[in-house]
Image (tube, rainbow, N blue to C red):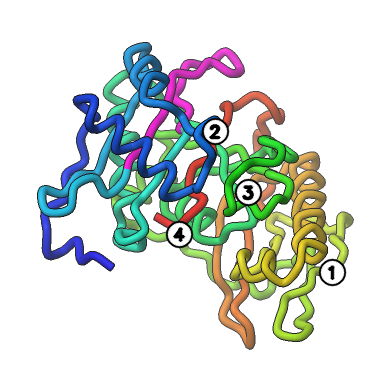
Amino acid sequence: MLDCRAMEVFVRPARDRADYEACVRLQREVWGLSDLEITSVIQLIATVHAGGVLLVADSPERGLLGFCYAFAALRGGESHLHSDMLAVTPAARGLGVGLRLKWAQREEALRRGLRLVTWTFDPMRAPNARLNLHHLGAISRELLPDFYGTTSSALHHGLATDRLMVRWELDHPRVERRQAGEAEDQPGLEAVPAINAVAWRHGLPVPSPPRLDLEGPELLLEIPAEWDAVCAAGAGLAREWQQVVRIGFESAFARGYSAAGFASLREEHPRFVYVLRRDSSPVAAGSDGSHDHSLHEPA
């Protein structure tokens, strides 16, 4: 793993063909997609020219470490950016490169007079949920079942590609506090009702059927700590998890909850939970952004 403290890292707009080609190579490295499913150099150039944003994290010593790509969007009649990809080279993961790219994306959107960025992510991947909801302060009110269908990426394990659509409301006080480095205070989550329970069998987490009758200002929805390990154990268990999480989110969103936080609870086994909060002014599903395969891997 690289040590970003020992080298300079710059976040800047892509500026030439070499930058665009490096982003294509990183798509292959991170997601293992077939060429037909990769966003090409030509497409990147065209959408950036039309108002999109392609930012790269660049090191003079190591070259391109990651990129963040968004295109102009108008879903729901609101001009915004839709962040379609965030990728960090495997050697630089866990060093904050993804966060730097996202905060730079926010600055660029605000500079253009935009107040919203949307994207989607796999709800089963705890590192992505932590980045998006906990560190960046985004929220979700919409789940998109099997959004991409079956893809060529080994990271998807041939499973349904359910995605949470998130809204990053750039000038919301919650987001401004995150940028200032203020962590969300989430005391007492152990006492919050959980939509699903988890039993451990042969070293693997097995979900209970979701409870859809729970009410309260907050609810929890648990996901596995290691999604790839669950998938490796068998497609049946992975599909069972996906179904429980899908139903849990859809039921909660329909009753006015938002996925507004993500936390880890330290017990006998590590627990990773979405924090669902009752909206005071819910937004109808389908009124926010578009799509994204960002952050299949932790950044």
As drawn, the label of residue 208 is 1
Q: Nearer the viewer, residue 291 or 188?
A: 291
Q: Nearer the viewer, mark 3 or mark 1?
A: 1
Marks 3 and 4, how far apart in space?
A: 14 Å
Taking the spot 63% from the left edge, 64% from the top edge, the residue there is 227
The answer to whether the residues at label 4 and label 1 have Cβ atoms under 8 Å apart is no
Residue that carries the numbered disc 2 in the rendered image: 37
The region drawn magenta spans 67-83
Taking the spot 37% from the left edge, 11% from the top edge, the residue there is 50
5 to the left or right of 24: left
Q: Is residue 268 above or below residue 33?
A: below
Marks 2 and 4, how far apart in space?
A: 37 Å
Q: Nearer the viewer, mark 3 or mark 2?
A: 2
Sequence order check, earlier mark of 2 and 4:
2
Sequence order check, earlier mark of 3 and 4:
4
Q: Is residue 226 above or below residue 77?
A: below
Taking the spot 12% from the left edge, 64% from the top edge, the residue there is 6
Q: How far across and down, in percent of the image, does residue 122 sit?
A: 61, 49
Taking the spot 35% from the left edge, 63% from the top edge, the residue there is 94
The answer to whether the residues at label 3 and label 1 have Cβ atoms under 8 Å apart is no
Residue that carries the numbered disc 3 in the rendered image: 259
Sequence order check, earlier mark of 3 and 1:
1
Q: Nearer the viewer, mark 2 or mark 4?
A: 2
Task: Classify 10 Å Cα crowding around label 2: few (below 14), some (14-19), many (20 and above).
Answer: few
Q: Amino acid at mark 2?
A: Glu
Marks 2 and 1, how far apart in space?
A: 35 Å
Q: Nearer the viewer, residue 171 or 67?
A: 67
Q: Amino acid at mark 1?
A: Ser
25 to the left or right of 57: right
Sequence order check, earlier mark of 3 and 2:
2
